[in-house]
Image (cartoon, rainbow, N blue to C red):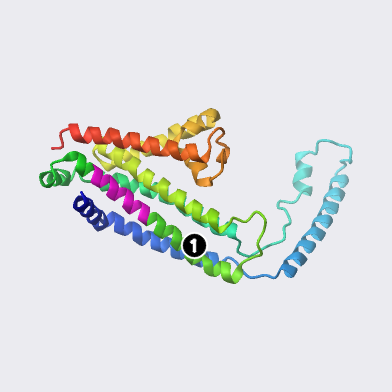
Amino acid sequence: MIRLIGAELRRACARRLVRWTIVLAVLTVVVIGVVSFFNTASLSESAYQQRVRDAEARQVAERAQVTACVRSHGVGPGDVKIPDDVARDCFPDGRIRAADPRFYKRTLKGGVSGMLGVLVVVGWALGASLVGAEFPSRSMTTMLTWEPRRGRLFAAKVVATLAVVAALTVAVAVAVVVVMLPAYAMHGGPHRANDPTTASIVGLMARGTLVCALASGIGLAIATIGRNTAAALGAGFAYIIVLENIVGSTLPRYRRWLLLGNVIVFLTGKDGGGEVLGRTVTTAGLFLVGATATLLLGAAASFRTRDIA
């Protein structure tokens, strides 16, 4: 079994899709690092506080201008409703804020979280392709002449796919943190009470790795049942874009029984996160593992009984 898994790992790493995914991931990580560094700047706390005082002074002046403008249009202080044309003339378009160009830990966590969201979709596509492409190309038939025990072969493909996607996720998440560290070291702002801790970022990376691996397992299972990559990608698009959005928006109480709702809770690491009420982080993780295992068992049964040729 170890040799079989090793062969599947080598086959997966030799796929052009996997290699191009790695290349695109490297380019994306580099862009994230460059943008993070050049879109932030160092600033002393005293200089920032001066900006805050200046912004507050401008807000006071702006409120005075708005009051004078409204009164010049004949609207008194006791009037509840302000006409739209008066609002357009008197109220400013934006809000005055004190610009803070410094890099905070929440930005670091946001970068990791955003990348993990992309990697979930990538994991689904890789899981679908690594198995789905073998049916139309007849390479699955060739593999079965070397290893006729279908259960062992399917298990090896599952282990190899999950391992490749998990390793890719860990590598990319760590790389995102590394490329953002120069911005944090050079332009980092002071620690704030709501800033994430290092442990929370590591926990996010661990949960994201599990979700990406599970997504690849779901993609693999659907591709095995449908016998091509398009089946998994089409099913994923129809389910996530159509069914999940419709049910999630019209029946919010059922969001905790949907894949996307549980992914949101699990990745945020907060019970009821993303307004998915009635779902804890632990139960969300168990739900995702159970859903993936159920689909993989169904795919294994289909793979064992259906004719491959």
Residue 31 percent location from the top left of the image: 46, 64
Quarter of the image with the C terminus is top left
What residue is shown at x 57% (from left), y 70% (from top)? 185
Check the image and name the residue furthest to the left.
Answer: 145
On screen, residue 44 above or below 201: below
Using a 10 Å C-alpha cutoff, classify the residue at mark 1 as few (fewer than 14 neighbours), some (14 to 19) or many (20 or more). some
Q: Is residue 35 visible?
A: yes
What residue is shown at x 54% (from left), y 53% (from top)? 200
What residue is shown at x 16% (from left), y 47% (from top)? 139
Residue 156 colored in magenta in the image: yes
Q: Which residue is mark 1?
A: 177
Residue 123 percent location from the top left of the image: 36, 48
Please state the extent of the stretch shown in magenta in the rendering: 155-167
On screen, residue 207 above or below 84: below
On screen, residue 58 above or below 83: below
User: Would you say 4 lies left or right of 294 here?
Assistant: left
What residue is shown at x 53% (from left), y 37% (from top)? 280
Residue 11 colored in magenta in the image: no
Given residues 164 and 25, the one toward you in this image is: 164
User: Would you say 40 lies left or right of 228 here?
Assistant: right
Q: Main secondary structure of the magenta part?
A: helix
The three-letter amino acid code for the residue at tag 1 is Val
Q: Secondary structure at mark 1?
A: helix
Residue 219 sits in which quadrant?
Answer: top left
Given residues 70 and 250, the one toward you in this image is: 250
Residue 226 percent location from the top left of the image: 26, 36
